[in-house]
Image (cartoon, grey):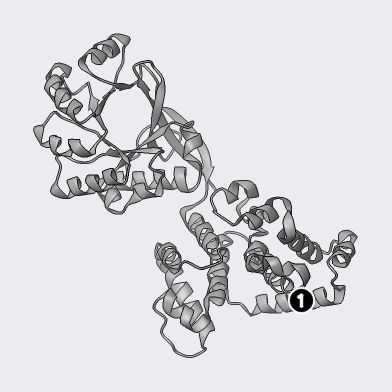
């Protein structure tokens, strides 16, 4: 776990109602932009406040104005967000290239709101007007009287105008007369710091990987995309798949190829195991071992009696049973970052449903909770001897795994 720092500044309409917040990346408690590349800043902002937390909470249900460079746009970072939650702020452009126009047009067609920042009155920006919704003007750099002809052109395309760096009420009144719709600056709202905690990027990736392996049908495209973000993970997974699949010197160069050797179920297990082992890399591996044993036991017990109805969820639920300990976070908070099936969430949070019963039975046996175990076993129509044997089998299976190979 590590602390995260984000700054935000409100954007107001003429009635001084907040319509959104511009978000700024910070890497310390000091409220100033760090000396990092703008591409990196945008990426970190996305990771910290969308993948790992709730951007709607951060912006109190209002729009989030987020800076995106041309590189961010090419890599389709904005598509990670709901189009109704954000405004794409174009930054780092001295003039619109042909490529930028195509990119902006693409996001416009997909329904995203787009804001042109660093506007300097140059006529060459007009080529973007059909595709943008907002123009932001730094009034410390632009004479607002010179802006009037540009405002007339913008109104043809129903573009709203934001005045940045507003410092006094008199400025606001004058700017409204010129044609400004929205206002941002220290007069209204000083940039404020929001401090929080987040997971490391690697752990977030692992949680995404675990989420994918919990689904009924494995999406090889998504799994490959997540794995491709980490070279060591890619090499480790393919080596692991190759070793387990045939025992021969077969070169595996893709997850799709690996699936032809292993089958989907085995591949899902290997992906989940590798993800879990990466999550526990900073802790004693006993927690990881217990999670693996729990997952394996739940998988085998799910072939018995009415547990058959939750067989597809059993293994991943067991793996995630120790996630709260591994990440030192409440399980309910962790699950916000993982789009899991409802039965898995209910089982992990409250031992609810058939899957919850299976999890409760398994963890009670492993923890040697004699007070409850006999009652649970009897209720499910199982025998203690059979469960004891499945426990021993799961321990042997776990011991045979080479988690770090």
Q: Is residue 286 visible?
A: no
203 to the left or right of 124: right
Residue positioned 76% across, 67% down in the render:
306
Crowd rating for badge 1 (residues with CA inside 10 Å; few <14, some 14–19, many 20+): some
**Residue situated in front as seen by the camera: 401 or 378:** 378
Residue 349, how many percent across, how many down?
69, 51
104 to the left or right of 375: left
Residue 5, how many percent across, how many down?
46, 38
Q: In this figure, what is the number of numbered marks?
A: 1
**Residue situated in front as seen by the camera: 22 or 347:** 347
Residue 49, how many percent across, how many down?
46, 42
Q: Would you place residue 67 above or below residue 12 in this image?
A: below
SS at circle 1: helix
Per the image, the residue denoted by label 1 is 390
- Give the farthest residue toward the bottom: 248
Q: Quadrant of residue 389?
A: bottom right
Residue 111, how many percent across, how many down?
32, 42
Residue positioned 18% across, 38% down in the render:
128
Residue positioned 56% across, 48% down in the render:
336
362 to the left or right of 370: left
- Give the farthest residue toward the left: 123
Q: Quadrant of residue 36?
A: top left
**Residue situated in front as seen by the camera: 202 or 384:** 384
Q: Is residue 77 visible?
A: yes
**Residue situated in front as seen by the camera: 8 or 3:** 8
């Amino acid at each position: 776990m590590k602390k995260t720092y984000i700054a935000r500044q409100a954007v107001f309409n003429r009635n001084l109602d907040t319509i959104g917040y511009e978000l700024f990346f910070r890497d310390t408690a000091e409220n100033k932009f760090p000396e990092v590349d703008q591409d990196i800043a945008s990426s970190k902002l996305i990771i910290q406040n969308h993948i790992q937390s709730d951007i709607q909470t951060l912006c109190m249900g209002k729009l989030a104005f987020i800076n995106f460079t041309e590189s961010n746009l090419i890599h389709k970072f904005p598509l990670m967000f709901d189009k109704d939650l954000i405004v794409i702020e174009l930054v780092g452009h001295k003039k619109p290239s042909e490529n930028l126009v195509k990119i902006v047009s693409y996001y416009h067609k997909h329904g995203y709101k787009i804001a042109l920042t660093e506007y300097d009155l140059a006529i060459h920006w007009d080529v973007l007007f059909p595709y943008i919704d907002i123009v932001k003007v730094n009034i410390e750099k632009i004479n607002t009287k010179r802006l009037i002809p540009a405002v007339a052109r913008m109104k043809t395309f129903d573009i709203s105008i934001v005045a940045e760096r507003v410092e006094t009420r008199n400025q606001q009144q004058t700017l409204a007369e010129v044609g400004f719709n929205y206002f941002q600056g220290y007069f209204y709202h000083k940039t404020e710091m929001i401090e929080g905690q987040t997971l490391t990027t690697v752990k977030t990736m692992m949680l995404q990987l675990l989420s994918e392996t919990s689904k009924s049908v494995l999406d090889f495209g998504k799994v490959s995309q997540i794995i491709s973000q980490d070279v060591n993970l890619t090499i480790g997974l393919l080596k692991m798949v190759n070793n387990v699949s045939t025992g021969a010197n077969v070169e595996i160069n893709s997850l799709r190829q690996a699936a032809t050797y292993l089958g989907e179920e085995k591949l899902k297990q290997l992906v989940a195991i590798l993800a879990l082992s990466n999550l526990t890399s900073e802790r004693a591996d006993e927690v990881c071992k217990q999670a693996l044993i729990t997952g394996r036991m739940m998988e085998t017990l799910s072939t018995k009696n009415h547990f058959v109805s939750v067989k597809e969820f059993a293994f991943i639920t067991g793996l995630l049973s120790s996630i709260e300990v591994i990440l030192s976070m409440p399980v309910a908070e962790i699950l916000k970052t993982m789009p899991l099936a409802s039965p898995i969430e209910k089982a992990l949070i409250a031992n609810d449903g058939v899957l919850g019963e299976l999890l409760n039975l398994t963890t009670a046996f492993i923890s040697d909770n004699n007070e409850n175990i006999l009652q649970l076993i009897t209720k499910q129509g199982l025998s203690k001897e059979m469960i004891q044997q499945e426990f021993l089998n799961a321990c042997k299976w776990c011991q045979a795994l080479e988690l770090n190979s």
